[in-house]
Image: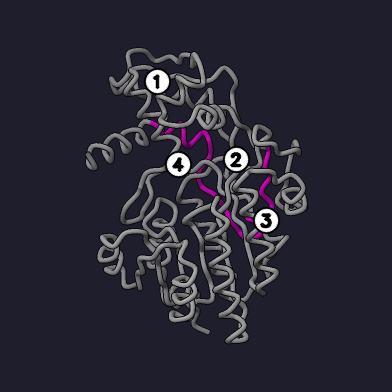
């Protein structure tokens, strides 16, 4: 069976990198055989992605009628949703459209959603000290969802999937670093943000509390998506629905150690005045420097997540990057950030 695959967020950092990997696959793989369509937000992004030999659609993902028509007209059976982890409406519209498609054709449809590890941090109200992706995460999310938009979206994915007969999978993505391979946005969010703020302020600041978030290089995230989607398209048995959480966490990062490493590398490059770190005087100062609301800046700089990935490794995932490898390559990472920033200004 030739599958029809739709990727949202195809012009983004992760979505663009996943798309680049998928279109480069050989025709003897399930992904390589699939007909790939991609959704973008702006008309000017269409032509550049069409050169990859795929169908490119510009649409407002909050237009439920348009989403339904796209899924029907392009005969989509699998969606890799990388456009938003925190808007339950978008996930609902996409899943409902897949459900209708599955009912009309009597075929199984699949929805792969990207969630985020910050929803599983104690600072965000997560109640468990250590969480494996084999545990009953859905029940815990359902119990404490509160107003956390990422958790609420996860719940919507599972419940809409059950209601519409769509198999769902939730990939929980950590802090991602490294240069992406997509056509447009090739920089991650967190590391470039800290680098830019440090260069602007001429010094590197950190919080007194050291976080320990999960992390992964973009290439390892792309590899995991390839493994998961390939098995789904090959109709291999993989955990789904309430059991379909996947922690794509390759390693942890000690945030204070990372900021010290950034200070030393920026000093070597002549971009800050000292190879040392300073404490943020307040959340408001940190937020103003990073361009974030104060509470978000605090969460980014201090949160920890004790997430234990099991299912990705059971699928055969072998991440190549570690914290040590990141620190060894941090100088090049920073140079890439500065060069790409210069090219876009």
Q: Earlier in the sequence, mark 1 or mark 3?
A: 3
Name the front one of labels 3 and 2: 3
Q: Is residue 313 visible?
A: no
Residue bearing the label numbered 3: 155
Marks 4/1: CA distance? 18 Å
Depth check: 340 or 301 in front?
A: 301
Residue interval drawn in magenta:
306-330
Name the front one of labels 1 and 3: 3
Q: Is residue 138 visible?
A: yes
Count of number-bearing discs: 4
Task: Give neighbour class at mark 4: few <14, some 14-19, many 20+ (Cα, 10 Å).
Answer: many
Mark 4 in CB contact with mark 1 (< 8 angstroms)? no
Marks 3/2: CA distance? 16 Å
Q: Position of residue 336 (x, y in %)?
A: 31, 38
Q: Position of residue 320 (x, y in %)?
A: 51, 47
Residue bearing the label numbered 2: 118
Residue 295 in magenta?
no
Residue bearing the label numbered 4: 177
Depth check: 26 or 288 in front?
A: 288
Q: Earlier in the sequence, mark 4 or mark 1?
A: 4
Q: Position of residue 75 (x, y in %)?
A: 48, 81
């Amino acid at each position: 069976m030739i599958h029809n695959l739709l990727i949202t967020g195809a012009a983004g950092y992760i979505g663009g990198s996943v798309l680049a990997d998928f279109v480069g696959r050989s025709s003897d793989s399930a992904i390589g055989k699939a007909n790939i369509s991609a959704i973008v937000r702006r008309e000017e992004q269409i032509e550049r992605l069409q050169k990859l030999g795929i169908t490119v659609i510009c649409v407002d993902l909050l237009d439920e009628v348009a989403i339904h028509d796209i899924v029907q007209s392009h005969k989509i059976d699998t969606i890799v949703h990388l456009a938003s982890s925190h808007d339950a409406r978008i996930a609902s519209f996409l899943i409902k459209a897949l459900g209708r498609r599955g009912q009309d054709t009597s075929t199984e449809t699949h929805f792969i959603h990207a969630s985020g590890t910050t929803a599983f941090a104690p600072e965000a109200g997560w109640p468990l000290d250590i969480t494996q992706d084999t545990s009953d995460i859905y029940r815990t999310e359902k119990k404490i969802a509160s107003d956390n938009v990422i958790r609420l979206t996860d719940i919507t994915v599972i419940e809409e999937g059950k209601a519409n007969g769509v198999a769902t999978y939730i990939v929980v993505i950590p802090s991602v670093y490294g240069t992406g391979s997509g056509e447009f946005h090739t920089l991650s969010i967190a590391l470039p943000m800290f680098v830019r703020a440090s260069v602007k302020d001429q010094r590197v600041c950190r919080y007194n509390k050291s976080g320990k978030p999960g992390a992964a290089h973009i290439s390892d995230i792309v590899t995991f998506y390839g493994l998961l989607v390939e098995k789904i398209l090959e109709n291999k048995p993989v955990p789904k629905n309430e059991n379909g959480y996947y922690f794509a966490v390759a390693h942890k990062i000690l945030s204070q150690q990372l900021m010290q490493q950034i200070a030393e590398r920026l000093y070597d490059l002549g971009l800050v005045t000292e190879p040392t770190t300073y404490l943020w005087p307040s959340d408001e100062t940190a937020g103003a420097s990073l361009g974030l609301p104060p509470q978000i800046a605090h969460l980014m700089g201090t949160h920890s997540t004790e997430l234990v990935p099991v299912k990705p490794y059971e699928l055969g995932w072998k991440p190549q990057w570690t914290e040590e490898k990141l620190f060894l390559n941090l100088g090049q990472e920073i140079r890439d950030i500065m060069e790409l920033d210069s090219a876009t200004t």
